[in-house]
Image: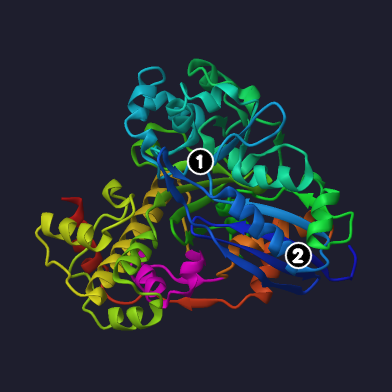
Amino acid sequence: MSDRTKAFAAVDLGASSGRVMVGHVGPDTLHVSVAHRFPNRPVRLPEGLRWDILGLYAGVLDGLRAAGRVDSVGIDSWAVDYGLLDADGALLGNPVHYRDSRTEGVAEKVWTTVPAAELYAATGIQYAPFNTLYQLAAAREARQLACAERLLMIPDLISYWLTGEQGTELTNASTTQLVDPRTRDWSYDTAARLGIDLELFAPLRQPGDPAGLLRPEVLDETGLQGPVPVTAVGSHDTASAVAAVPATTRNFAYICTGTWSLAGLELEAPVLTEASRAANFTNELGIDGTVRYLRNIMGLWLLQECMRDWGLADVVPLLREAARVPGLRAVVDAAEPAFLAPGGMPRRIQAACRATGQPVPETPAEITRCVLDSLALAHRKAIEDAQRLSGRSADVVHVVGGGARNELLCRLTADACGLPVVAGPAESAALGNVLVQARAHRAVGDLASMRGLLARTQPLTTYEPRGDRAEWDAAARRIAG
């Protein structure tokens, strides 16, 4: 391994914004800085909700231009969504947004061919109406799909435009509900029964595999000096975030917080039991043969939507006021599908409280406290269920991602779980992206070494549990009915 600090560009595309981060890695060095941030605003067209993928790609190019010299580029993004290419490699329309309504009622139709229990036993993926499998079923009669020669998940599409080479990275592929988590290959039987042509997908890639070199046109546009390799990373942003959990023990739980909360355990093998399916846990693939056994929770989307409704941009004063509101007066089920769509979130939260006979929060601070108490409860339930269903215990909870900066949420999660919470790093997806690149380019060692470097170099805050868990038990019973 070279003693020279190496630089890696992490393209990290979230559901509401994108950024290009530059990470510098050496034997005892790990830090990331922002080269460029840009918005990710979906567009509602007459045909439905779509991603502005060209705007995102322009933001990526601007970010690479601002990044300066780098030894590699890696790309991660949200999961399940994809772009379709024709025989010439041209994009067939803007990718459909996972919150588009086209998948409403589709899952039930799919289950008439492959029952839900069989689908889970084959793929281990939790039910979500927007899973790629259901999106493909919804698009079965669409002309775009009929004309398509290739399907690329969002980070693979960006990688293709940068390099001209096509591949399907495994951690993101596992979210399609078309991968067998035991073989870490396609679930050929599932696809055949549902009439899904797996030839649409490019060959699978592993995190750390080479994904091509920046095209000459990209070098010209960004000012980078070639050759610059693109390296496959854990291209599902949660896979990258979990790779950046600074765990020093095997028995840890994690919560990746942002627009969504992904709460669970890192396992060596999937849990494909009927009890696991009934609890709506997913088995997504991670790096180095790991399985991300987790539940998908609505997350800070609830608060983001409330703030949009209130016309507020700064969350800090709101959290300060919410901390003074008495806790657990009213809570909602943060996994309730009624909270999935955008718009009118404060009213929907109030309606849910009213329907369960609880005091209705009125002010922004009261609604914010309701949201955060509810998220802490959802975190607790997910972590307790994950331990029960997997047989693996957790001694500590690592909170990574943007929510690691939310002191109130971290304190409430520690109180609800009755376990210490270690908060940080906040830039976990970018750091995981950088570290997988760094390992591929011999700047860092194995997963344990990566996590050791994180623990030594990243600012972390520990929150010890406080108070009486009986109050949390009582609140949980209110929303359980």
* Marker disc for residue 409: none
Residue 347 location (% of width, % of height) = 20, 61
Residue hosting label 2: 65
Residue hosting label 1: 283
Residue 425 location (% of width, % of height) = 57, 70
The region drawn magenta spans 396-424
At label 1, which amino acid type do we have?
Asn
Q: Residue at x 21, y 68 (%)?
A: 471
Q: Residue at x 71, y 58 (%)?
A: 61
- Can residue 409 be found in the magenta stretch? yes
Residue 481 location (% of width, % of height) = 15, 50
User: In this rendering, does residue 461 appear at all?
Assistant: yes
Element under disc 2: helix
- Can residue 423 be found in the magenta stretch? yes
Q: Is residue 77 left or right of residue 20?
A: left
Q: Is residue 151 left or right of residue 415?
A: right
| Image vertical order of residue 38 relative to residue 160, above or below | below
CA separation in Å, label 1 and label 2: 37 Å
Element under disc 1: strand
Q: Nearer the viewer, mark 1 or mark 2?
A: 2
State which quarter of the image contains the N terminus. bottom right
Determine the image quadrant of residue 426. bottom right
Q: Nearer the viewer, residue 348 or 23?
A: 348
At label 2, which amino acid type do we have?
Arg
Q: Residue at x 49, y 71 (%)?
A: 404
User: In this rendering, does residue 444 appear at all?
Assistant: no
